[in-house]
Image: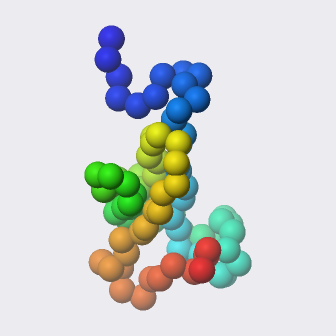
Amino acid sequence: QYTVGPCSNDPDWSKICGYVYHDLNKNCGFDSSDQALKSIKIKLNSSPIRYTYTNTNGYYEFWVLKGTYDVEQIISNYPGLGQLCPG
């Protein structure tokens, strides 16, 4: 059987994941009053460059070979929003 992504216990793979949300009180932490942002495009600067979108909970993930990567939120379609943390 073929699957996309790592096999269990494969030490060569890592998961990069996180949440995108509107930090209403600007404390750099997710609180019950904060709003998860769905359908935000997330760019992984890898070779080749990869993209995914946040789900309804603002969650995204990539499975990658161990290494160093940059992750970028594409929020240009959301006027008034910008990245607050980490800055």
Q: How many marks?
A: 0
Q: Is residue 24 visible?
A: no
Q: Is residue 27 visible?
A: yes
44 or 53, nearer to the observer:
44
Q: How is the image coloured?
A: rainbow
Q: Looking at the image, which residue is at 41% across and 31% down?
A: 5
35 or 4, nearer to the observer:
4
Q: Looking at the image, which residue is at 32% across and 17% down?
A: 2
Q: Where is residue 43 in the image (x, y as percent from the top left)?
A: 37, 61
Query: Is 63 above or below relative to 83?
Result: above
Q: Where is residue 25 in the image (x, y as percent from the top left)?
A: 66, 81
Q: Position of residue 57 (x, y in %)?
A: 49, 54
Q: Where is residue 47 in the image (x, y as percent from the top left)?
A: 32, 52
Q: Looking at the image, which residue is at 36% across and 71% down?
A: 74
66 or 8, nearer to the observer:
66
Query: Is 14 above or below relative to 49?
Result: above
- Residue furthest top as drawn: 1
Q: Looking at the image, which residue is at 42% across and 69% down?
A: 73
Query: Is 87 above or below relative to 3?
Result: below
Image quadrant containing the N terminus: top left
43 or 78, nearer to the observer:
43
Image quadrant containing the C terminus: bottom right
